[in-house]
Image: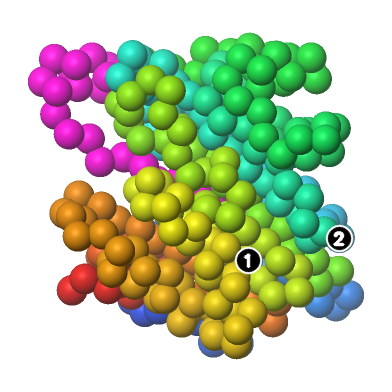
Amino acid sequence: MKINRRNFIKTGAVAGGGILLSQIPSSKIFSSSIKDLKNPIVVSTWEPNLKSNAKAMEILLTGNNSLNAIEEGIKVTEADPTDSSVGYGGLPDAEGVVTLDASIMDWSGNAGSVAFLQNIMHPISVARLVMEKTKHVMLAGEGAKKFALENGFKEENLLTEESRTAWLKWKEKNEKKDNHDTIGMLAIDKFSNMSGGVSTSGMAFKLHGRVGDSPIIGAAMFVDNEVGGAVSTGNGEYVMRTLGSFLIVEKMREGNSPQKACELAVERVYKSYKNLIDVNVCYIALSKSGEVGAYSLKKGFTYCVTTPDDNKSYESDFLIK
């Protein structure tokens, strides 16, 4: 039975590390003909982002490129008020302000990012405009906001009542809040071109002004169209200190599989830093051949893999057992 491609099946998490696309069983969740589409695949961090992957795959199945798929896929999560770690509804910083970071990169090595952006719904789209309309890679703070407004974006209040209530409770009790679940996404289109993107509202109740790894090219995300790409999630400070996504791509360039490359990047964090009690660092990688790898420092990281036939989440293997 064919199912409209707007409707997708959410399956249970499957334990394991890296997977090959050939190992994913077909369930024909997208109805479009793919005879002339050679390589469409989307991967992303965290199981709830199956919905974002489905949108990205929908874009790819129209014959569109991977950059458009990344932007439109991530926008789904950015606009979701129930996601407390990305965009609208994201938990604020210590002063009750929602600040956003995002980055995007295409198959030609072009990149754009925004940091400490406020009151703009879709930072991933602003990051793309930075890449396409300026000579720069990153804009931050008021400058990024001014650029967005000059390019047609509207100023919006991104603090939902739920997020505001959570912030007030945190202020009252000053309890630790573990919330840093960035969406990172990679996609390959019918032209065999890869793009990547990342978006987040950052660590919950962080110091005002804190910027994580998400807008740093080579840290939270890196793409090399000859080799593959990688994205991260977790405690961004540790990703920044080791340039994890760039490291993974370089390890793949040296001949390592995406799975092995992710493991090496996590091991680098483990060997470099002693106090990792409240830290988790997670990576997914995608090679040009369509092989997927995933690994995390600790248990609990899930990731999504979407092809024209399937939209599934998996639980990654991890180092500290």
The residue drawn where x is 49% and y is 38% is 200
Query: CA–CA distance between discs 1 and 2?
Result: 21 Å
Q: Position of residue 131 (x, y in %)?
A: 78, 39
Q: Which mark is residue 229?
A: 1
The residue drawn where x is 26% and y is 22% is 166
Q: Is residue 140 left or right of residue 63?
A: left
Q: Is residue 225 left or right of residue 262?
A: right
Residue 166 visible here = yes
- Local SS, label 2: loop
Q: Which mark is residue 13?
A: none
Neighbourhood count class around disc 2 (C-alpha, 10 Å): few under 14, some 14–19, many 20 upward: some
- Local SS, label 1: strand
Amino acid at the residue labelled 2:
Gly
Which span of residues is magenta-colored?
Answer: 163-187
Q: Position of residue 296 (x, y in %)?
A: 35, 66
Q: Is residue 246 above or below residue 97?
A: below
Q: Is residue 177 magenta?
A: yes
Q: Is residue 274 above or below residue 124?
A: below
Q: Quadrant of the N terminus?
A: bottom right
Q: Quadrant of the C terminus?
A: bottom left
The residue drawn where x is 35% and y is 15% is 96
Query: Of tags 1 and 2, which is closer to the observer?
Result: 1
The residue tagged 2 is: 63
Residues under numbered marks 1 and 2 in contact, where contact means CB atoms less than 8 Å apart? no
